Amino acid sequence: MKYRLDQLLSRKHLTPSREKARGHILAGNVLVNDEVITKVGYLVDENVSLRLKVNERYVSRGGLKLEKALKTFSIDVKDQIVLDVGASTGGFTDCLLQHDVQWVYSVDVGYNQLDYRLRNHQQVTVMEKLNAKNLHPDLFDKPINLAVIDVSFISLTKVLSFVLSVLKDREIIALIKPQFEVGEQITGFKGVVKKAEDHLKALHLVNDYALSTGLFTQSLTYSPIKGPKGNREFLIHWSDRKSKEVIDFKAVIDQAHQELRD
């Protein structure tokens, strides 16, 4: 019997869901008989040899993104209280816990997405069905030192001020997804931003808004892996500490294009 590749990965418990299976396939992480297959609907026999190229250190690939940000930005989150906005299955939350945070508030507009291991973790407060625009200080019983943000289908400029309103320390690491910043006239029907100049436009759009709130840009890097559809993504660090360093956005974008080729 033949199955779709995403279906068989989930069926064989190589991934916890078909959604995660699709992400791995599109990222080129799935080998069928030692050959990389990037077509989600590729039909395979039930007894075919399947293998993932990546080490599942976190419950989702998002953990790898935040891990790079923490290392690149030299941020120590040990004993910190952190707000995870757009937690989804919990990649960022998992990464934070593995870096010894004291507590994580995991916020998502969705429901029942957070991995069960994190859902039952004694250092995690699960806050589901909560839109980032409805964040309010009264919802939190601990002072928040840092926010990490990974939202989809909405611009960061639409949620940033609400996140800032609940923080004790105005410190943020955000994943910038250009496809949700520049509009459909650039992404096209496939929802992918390919040109470096469009990435630059997206970064400046989001960063300029952050600066208007009184934040200062501390650092910028690119995600070590592409998004599910093949989009290059970027991680940025803001705080209210003045920074004399001038960040070369274009250099970071050029490096992303060199390292993560189409």
Image: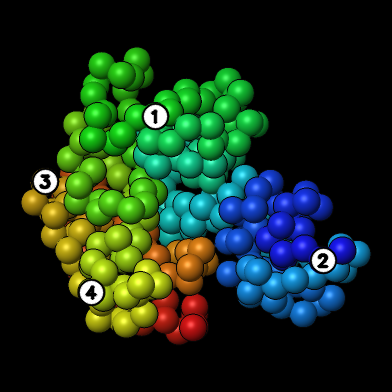
Picture quadrant where residue 99 is located: top right
Count of numbered tags: 4
Q: Amino acid at mark 4?
A: Gln
Q: Mark 3 — residue?
A: 213
Neighbour tally class for label 3: few under 14, some 14-19, many 20 plus, Cα within 10 Å: few
Q: Do callouts 4 and 1 mark residues in contact (Cβ within 8 Å)? A: no
Q: Looking at the image, tell me whether mark 1 or mark 2 is earlier in sequence order.
A: 2
Mark 4: secondary structure:
helix
In the picture of the structure, the residue carrying the numbered disc 2 is: 2
Which of label 3 and label 2 is nearer to you?
2
Q: Position of residue 14 (x, y in %)?
A: 76, 54
Q: Which mark is residue 129?
A: 1
Lateral position of residue 67 relative to residue 195, left or right: right
Q: Which residue is mark 4?
A: 185
- Identified by mark 1, the residue type is Lys
Marks 1, 3: nearer the viewer: 1
Mark 4 surroundings: few (<14), some (14-19) or many (≥20) residues within 10 A: few
219 or 253, nearer to the observer: 253
Residue 158 makes an appearance in the image: yes
Relative horizontal placement of residue 44, taking residue 42 as reference (left or right): right
Badge nearest the viewer, 3 or 4:
4
Q: Secondary structure at mark 2?
A: strand
Q: Is residue 159 above or below residue 46?
A: above
